[in-house]
Image (cartoon, rainbow, N blue to C red):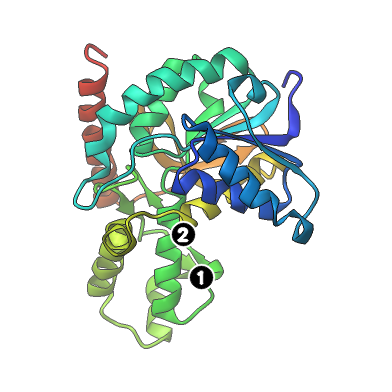
Amino acid sequence: MNCLNDRKVAVVGCGFVGSASAFALMESGLFSEIVLIDANREKAEGEALDISHGLPFAKPMQIYAGDYTDIADAAVVVVTAGAGQKPGETRLDLVKKNTGIFKSIIPEIARHNQDGILLVVANPVDVLTYAAKEFSGFPENRVFGSGTTLDTARLKYLLGQHLEVDSRSVHAFIIGEHGDSEIAVWSSANVSGIPLNDFCEMRGHFDHEGAMKEIAEGVKNSAYRIIEKKGATYYGIAMSVRRICEAIVRDEKTILPVSCIQRGNHGISDVALSMPAIVGRNGVEGMAPISLSEKEEEELKASAETLKGVLREVFPGR
């Protein structure tokens, strides 16, 4: 990468998600410079000051409000800008509003930073990841979304609760759309290599179908429940942003279910959705193969078609 500062990140959008992400990134110690950009400059300045006042308890770094000229050397640009999801509104309801916002901000980012990684977090993340690729002209490996990274964490958390086991020992993925058509991949789920159903029975759970349905619904409705109770979700996604940035900056080659444009994977092309991908310093460095049951394969294709239908509305003639 050309003239980039690996210790610098830019966060575009200082709403709940952007400011929580900036705080999580400050706590991570991954970066020595964080620039916050928002249409409301004073909001960005206020968030930067508030976070900066905790630096004596953290690691030395610069956190400041800036504009697009300040992102020129940022290794990662995190885009959280967009209209928020309202109670009763699906992520896909947001698409036209937020695509319009992206049409103005993504070319500005691309004008000032040609070589960094564009991490899309705003919702609906799959459609906006595709839009960011279109509007930026960046190579596909360097434009991807947070996707189902948080949904997968929610699945692991709920399974950990159900089985009374450390959620970090649970290995399972949510794939497809970050939204209503997402798929829990039960066929390959395991707890430290032990097939999920076997582990469930070890823990005294035998109603596999019922439990899987209840947990999958719990994952799918998590955001709606949180929005209903407190108006927005932001801590979980902020920690997901931190985890993805960690994989990039440390060149970890970690497998994460990020949203990226598919090119024939499981017969799906020209749509951004989440599949397990190898994430490192160059962004998405390849797809990790995942075996799906026949039913999961069908559900994945249906999820892709749902997203393609939305893309046709946003990009007529595609």
Q: Residues within 10 Å of mark 2 (few under 14, many from 20)?
A: many
> For the residue marked with disc 2, what is the amino acid?
Ala
Q: Is residue 136 left or right of residue 71?
A: left
Residue 132, compared with residue 177, is above or below; it is above
Q: Nearer the viewer, residue 106 or 36?
A: 36
Q: Secondary structure at mark 1?
A: helix
Q: Nearer the viewer, residue 316 or 63?
A: 63
Q: Is residue 109 left or right of residue 175?
A: right
Toward which corner of the image does residue 160 lie, by quadrant? Answer: bottom left
Residue shown at the point (32%, 42%) measured from the top left = 177
Cβ atoms under marks 2 and 1 closer than 8 Å = yes
Residue 241, compared with residue 311, is above or below; it is below
Residue 208, label in figure: none
Residue 278, compared with residue 157, is above or below; it is above
Residue at the farthest bottom position: 204
Q: Nearer the viewer, residue 15 or 194?
A: 15
Residue shown at the point (68%, 30%) measured from the top left = 75
> For the residue marked with disc 1, what is the amino acid?
Ser
Q: Is residue 280 left or right of residue 298?
A: right
| Label 2 sits on residue | 153
Q: Position of residue 22 (x, y in %)?
A: 59, 46
Q: Position of residue 40 (x, y in %)?
A: 47, 32
First of labels 2, 1 by sequence position: 2
Screen quadrant of the C terminus: top left
Q: Is residue 85 left or right of residue 79?
A: left
| Label 1 sits on residue | 167
Q: Residues within 10 Å of mark 1 (few under 14, many from 20)?
A: some
Q: Secondary structure at mark 2?
A: helix
Toward which corner of the image does residue 116 lie, by quadrant? Answer: top right
> Would residue 241 be seen by someone viewing this image from the given angle?
no
Number of numbered labels in the structure image: 2
Residue shown at the point (47%, 50%) measured from the top left = 149
